[in-house]
Amino acid sequence: MKKNMGTTDKFIRFIIAAALLIAFFTGAVTGILGYVALAIAAIFILTSFVSFCPLYTLFGANTCKIK
């Protein structure tokens, strides 16, 4: 997997994931929507750590400055 996510992109995804996790664990989001938020948060955290987003590959996007 070639890295295709830049530092700013990873930071934004991590912040969104943290907000979704907080919303889930405080009970602000419950039921099916809560589990969807939890899944999205997990995906965002995983893609942030590996610096790779499969959707970016499909759309030809690359926010990583290092080639």
Image (cartoon, rainbow, N blue to C red):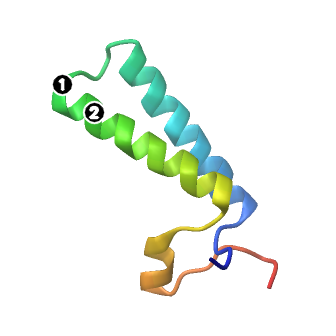
Q: Is residue 35 above or below residue 9?
A: above
Extreme residue in the top direction: 26
Q: At label 2, which amino acid type do we have?
A: Tyr
For the point 47% across and 22% down, the residue is 22
Q: Is residue 59 above or below residue 31?
A: below
Mark 1 highlights which residue? 31
Foreground residue among 53 and 19 = 53
Secondary element type, mark 2: helix
Q: Position of residue 13 (x, y in %)?
A: 56, 49
For the point 46% across and 42% down, the residue is 42
Q: At label 1, which amino acid type do we have?
A: Gly
Q: Position of residue 65 (x, y in %)?
A: 78, 77
Neighbours of disc 1 within 10 Å: few (<14), some (14-19), many (20+)? few
Mark 2 highlights which residue? 35
Q: Position of residue 36 (x, y in %)?
A: 28, 40
Secondary element type, mark 1: helix
Query: Disc 2 vs disc 1: Cβ atoms closer than 8 Å?
Result: yes
Q: Is residue 7 left or right of residue 31?
A: right
Residue 61 figure quarter:
bottom right
Extreme residue in the right direction: 66
